Image: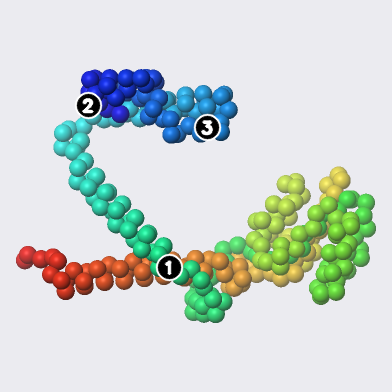
Amino acid sequence: MLCTALACKNEHKNDVLLAKVGNATLYKSDIQNLISTNLTQLDSVSLVKSIIENWVRKQVILQQALINLTEEEKNVDKELEEYRTSLIVYKYEQKYIKERLDTNVTEQELLQYYNDNTQNFILNNNVAKAQFIVLAKDINTEQLKTWLRMENTESLQRITEFCYQMALRYDYFNDKWVSFDNLKMLFPYTIAPSDQALTSSKLYEASDTSKQYILYIRELRTKGSQAPFEYVKDDIKNIIVLKRKQQLIKELEQNLYLDALNKNKFTIYE
């Protein structure tokens, strides 16, 4: 957006000048691609004002920097070339990976990695398999609590049927491990349980003026213990896929180097 007066005049002959800082100019055409056509008139005007202000702020800093820096400090050609090189290499590597990366990871591979790296999967918070139920305050819950403690398929079916008819909310969490932090957030702040309260009893009850809350802990793993496989399964998959990416890049670099070496594409001068 820095240009000579004559060049700017010709380039922006029919354009609208939005702002000017020193010799730097901002025209309407410079920001058109930043404005969505789906915005309302009010939102569009607000966004344009924000873009102009941000541009002015950056230009003010830039021009102050140009005044205060030496010619040597302002020479960023080397840094720009290094950045350009890194960016081009990165884009090529990402294209190469996209064309070749296998993202399918079998259950056996996941388990193998988990068993080989158990020391890397230690819990930094308490987790549990749980059931969470919210009911109106006047509903009798004795039978429900009996079913919860039974912990079998038949009782689970009865709990589900009961909650479908009576509960304001019922969450089985798809039988997955859930962190205590997430479980505590299910309660109103004033009656949210502590970690100690959740680890000391399988069944935690609380109530406010209109509702009663029941959290039943079926399985528990405490902070500092081995993380359940299911809890870290997605993390393991990401790790394995990342290692595959790193291996692809390593192979790419080595293959290109050997090919260039065999074809005398480079010379090293000692």
- Which residue lies at the image location 41% right of the left edge and 62% below the top edge? 98
Specify the farthest residue to the left.
Answer: 270
Does residue 231 show up?
A: yes
| Front tag of 1 and 2 | 1
Q: Nearer the viewer, residue 222 or 132?
A: 132
SS for dot 2: helix
Instruction: Specify the amino acid type for callout 2.
Output: Ile
Image marks 3 and 1: residues in contact by CB distance under 8 Å: no
Image quarter for residue 122?
A: bottom right
**N-terminal-most mark, 3 or 1:** 3
Residue 268 relative to residue 213: left or right: left
Residue 188, placed above or below residue 33: below
- Which residue lies at the image location 49% right of the left edge and 66% below the top edge? 238
Classify mark 2: residues with Cα within 10 Å, few (<14), some (14-19) or many (20+): few
* Residue that mark 1 sits on: 101
* Residue that mark 3 sits on: 37
Spatial CA distance of label 3 from label 1 is: 37 Å
- Which residue lies at the image location 26% right of the left edge and 49% below the top edge? 84
Image marks 1 and 2: residues in contact by CB distance under 8 Å: no
Classify mark 3: residues with Cα within 10 Å, few (<14), some (14-19) or many (20+): few
* Residue that mark 2 sits on: 67
SS for dot 3: loop
Q: Position of residue 79 (x, y in %)?
A: 23, 46
Classify mark 1: residues with Cα within 10 Å, few (<14), some (14-19) or many (20+): some
Instruction: Specify the amino acid type for callout 1.
Output: Leu
Spatial CA distance of label 1 from label 2 is: 49 Å
Spatial CA distance of label 3 from label 2 is: 39 Å
Image quarter for residue 127?
A: bottom right
Which quarter of the rendering shows the N terminus? top left
